[in-house]
Amino acid sequence: MRVLVCEDEKLLADAIAEWLRRESFAVDVAYDGDAALERIGVNGYDVVVLDRDLPVVHGDDVCRALVRAERDTRILMLTAAAAVRERVAGLAIGADDYLTKPFAFVELSARVHALTRRTRPAAPPQLTRAGIVLDPSRLQVTRDGNFVPLSRKEFSVLAELLRADGAVVSAEDLLERAWDEHIDPMTNVLRVTVMKLRRKLGDPPVIETVPGVGYQIR
């Protein structure tokens, strides 16, 4: 799942991004409204964490642009203004949720998780296939009842393959969903991640390579 953090306080923006990455999100960061619009125009995001008082292009205008684009992206608006009228105004221009500063990171991530559930069809609490059970809420994976320790990226790739419900997922889609915008499309990081996943999941192998297309779990 991919998130864009738009916040002009760089320390705060980077801290939010790092927190969300620990929870297996792919996260990009923009420090002003113009950079935010540029990234939104290039990448697809499940959630945009949007500071309302962005420089260059105001956060309200970024929000309006997202709404006009009619995408499935959800917007979590941040602001230091706690007045009810401010929250109402933010929701009125298209924000899906609102969080006032200062906030607890655990609450922010909980709200992002809730918003990502609205961007795609409802999924079961656990993803299961071929003896694999993936629990998104606990970030845990088992196969045939045995715990499988995975890195964050391995977990994200496996989750995308399980969500596909047997369909092939392209390498491009996996890179977009599990890594951020700085990933080199020619890198072998996905191939290495899949190789490690296969080893950790054990025999019989469950992740199949479809040459020239991508990967699948039948």
Image (cartoon, rainbow, N blue to C red):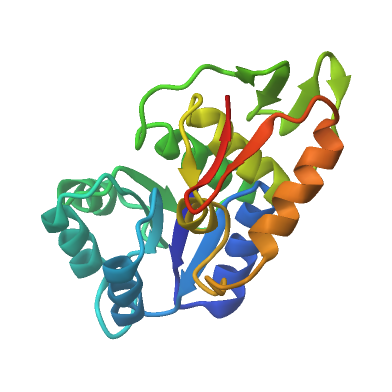
Which residue is at the front of the view, 127 or 206? 206
The picture quadrant where one finds residue 56 is bottom left
- What's the residue at 56%, 35% (across, down)? 216
Residue 168 shows in this picture: yes
Q: Is residue 214 above or below residue 16?
A: above
Which residue is at the front of the view, 131 or 31? 131
Q: Is residue 191 above or below residue 124?
A: below
- Split into 4 quadrants, where in the image is the C terminus? top right
Q: Is residue 67 above or below residue 142?
A: below
Is 177 on the left-hand or right-hand side of 135?
left
Is 156 on the left-hand or right-hand side of 38?
right
Q: Is residue 2 above or below residue 201?
A: below
- What's the residue at 52%, 54% (across, down)? 171
Percent position of residue 39, x then y: 35, 72
Which residue is at the front of the view, 96 or 80? 96
Percent position of residue 61, x then y: 18, 68
The picture quadrant where one finds residue 97 is top left
Point out the residue furthest to the front here: 211
